[in-house]
Amino acid sequence: MLFDSSLRKELGRSFSATLVVLVTIVMTVMLIRVLGQASSGSVNPSEVILIMGYTVLGQLPIILTLSLFISVTLTLTRMYAASEMVVWFASGQPLTAFARPAFRFAWPVLLALTLLSLLAVPWSNQQIQQLRQRYRERGDLERVAPGQFMESANGQRVFFVDKNTGGSKTGSDIFIASTERGKETVTSARAGRLAQQATGRFLMLDNGQQLETEQATGRMRISQFAQYGLRLTPGQSATVANDAPRQKSTLALITDPTPGSRGELAWRVGLILAAINCVLFALATTKVNPRAGRSAGVIFALLAFTAYYNLLTVGQTWISQGRVSLGTLLILLHGGIFVLSLIWLALRQGWRPGGRRNGGAARASAYAPGNVA
């Protein structure tokens, strides 16, 4: 059917263009954010691209929902401005007839969004947490970086190496401050090297001195050495307990009755319901005001999506705090917007309270581009 195929083709073009733009923007923002975290020592600099990929994957449900909302709005706005809607209305296609091709186009996107929200998002959150945990729990050797003060894995030592010579096995101008067994120790050396011994890995320091202070009595002792061995703390295994609701699988959230898990479940299910409501809401609210131009529809779509997104966040917080239940939020928020969209669509179709409908002349006049407010 010409009506069905033409509308879906135009929706596909708008959706593809919008998706590319939004993904590019999100990737740029996430790259800047992850680079900032890498510079502050929160993530491994060599894993920046990997973490950015997982982060973008976690944001894809929101990106797909917004792309779908904007594409429907842009398509209908252009059709109103070009008087194509008048042609379709005159040929006997009511406004509600646009819902079928719109949802026929949107169902693959909705299916992908469902899989992402329920399966891919918690998996990406787990991967990001594991990468961060593994980087935090790396051994003392991996923490040492030239020209930077780095803390050991157990938090009891601070290392500083002016520069490396001969790769990462040797260094010069080494400073180490530690607090162990009630003593504060400051050690400095001209050079140092790594040595593997039977009892573990050691940092062998050459030509230095050590200042040792007892915390209880304040007694100080200064000693010089030609060679001194300091045992390095081995790296710990990065075992991550998926206790945070964002990292739990959807099945675990369903079986967990705690408020935090219910709030996360409301967020994931809410993204799916929000995408469905956005398609219907775009059909019901898209208009063309010749004085405002086409950009007014896009601005309204962005503001409406932002408001919906904020309501999702607030609802998740309320459920996590135990203020509302999961079912109540789904009915009031998503069900309310669904009913509002249906009523709005019916009013634009010509329905009036009491079961009456406007006459054909009034409806045709309302659909005329110059009269649509």
Image (cartoon, rainbow, N blue to C red):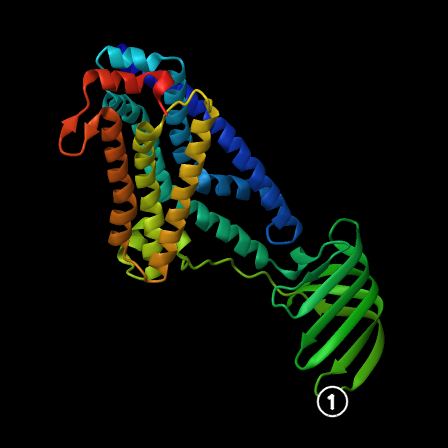
Q: Which residue type does callout 1 highlight?
A: Thr
Q: Residue 212 or 369: which is nearer the viewer?
A: 369
Q: Residue 81 or 236: which is nearer the viewer?
A: 81
Residue 110, how many percent across, how many down? 32, 33
Residue 68, how many percent across, how many down? 38, 30
Quarter the C terminus occupies = top left
Q: Residue 84 or 146: which is nearer the viewer?
A: 84
Quarter the N terminus occupies = top left
For disc 1, the neighbor class at 10 Å (few under 14, some 14 to 19, many from 20) is: few
Q: Secondary structure at mark 1?
A: loop
- For the point 45% across and 35% down, the residue is 302
Residue that carries the numbered disc 1 in the rendered image: 217
Residue 204, how many percent across, how many down? 76, 64
Left or right of 267, for residue 353: left
- For the point 68% across and 75% down, the residue is 179
Residue 108, by quadrant, is: top left
